[in-house]
Amino acid sequence: MSHYHLAQLNIGALKAPLNSPMLRDFVENLDQINALADASPGFIWRLTTDEGNATALRPLGEDIIINMSVWQDVDSLHHYVYASGHGGFMRRRREWFERMADAYMVLWWVEADHHPSVQEALTRLELLKQHGPTQAAFTFRQMYPAPEP
């Protein structure tokens, strides 16, 4: 059993308010997509508020939403993101989110019993933006192995 799990943060700049007609399909499917994550092999934890998602959290401004979760390993997260029903939902992201010039997703390893804070995740995203992929903050395109126990 690994002593480390994979944490991820992704952010999205909304094209319109969540209660707008433009984002209706996104909002109406959010519970289903989150339930799919919760039931996916390798899923450990995701950031939520009382609403069951994290859309009310806006640490980067009113028009940017965040999503954060922890997975058993890279393969589990990769399968959920690209090979599950989430993949089709993700391919529609340009309908709802602006194209971002900077990094909008970051991965990093956490101890198996740790659920990262929003501030910790934002710090990792900033590390990726400033230094590119490193052991401390990386992407699917340039992965780093979990630390040795």
Image (cartoon, helix red, strand yellow):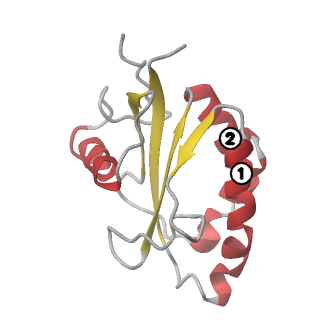
Image point (33%, 36%), residue name: 137
State the residue lying farthest toward the right. Answer: 85
Quarter occupied by the C terminus: top left
Residue 88 falls in which quadrant of the image?
Answer: bottom right
Q: Secondary structure at mark 2?
A: helix
* Residue 67: image location, x then y, percent: 50, 57
Image point (34%, 50%), residue name: 117
Residue 74 falls in which quadrant of the image?
Answer: top right
Residue 40 falls in which quadrant of the image?
Answer: top right
The one nearer the camera, 91 or 71, is: 71
Q: As shown in the figure, which amino acid type bears the numbered disc 1?
A: His
Quarter occupied by the N terminus: top right
Judge the density around disc 2: few (<14), some (14-19), many (≥20) Cα neighbours within 10 Å. many
Q: Secondary structure at mark 1?
A: helix
- Count of all numbered marks drawn on residues in the image: 2
Q: Is residue 56 above or below residue 32?
A: below
State the residue lying farthest toward the bottom. Answer: 20
As measured in the structure, the alpha-carbon distance from the residue carrying label 2 to the one carrying label 1 is: 7 Å
Q: As shown in the figure, which amino acid type bears the numbered disc 2?
A: Tyr
Image point (37%, 44%), residue name: 116
Q: Would you name the residue on which mark 2 appears? A: 80
* Residue 132: image location, x then y, percent: 29, 37
Marks 2 and 1 close (CB-CB < 8 Å): yes
Q: Which mark is residue 37?
A: none
* Residue 16: image location, x then y, percent: 53, 84
State the residue lying farthest toward the top. Answer: 148
Q: Would you name the residue on which mark 1 appears? A: 86
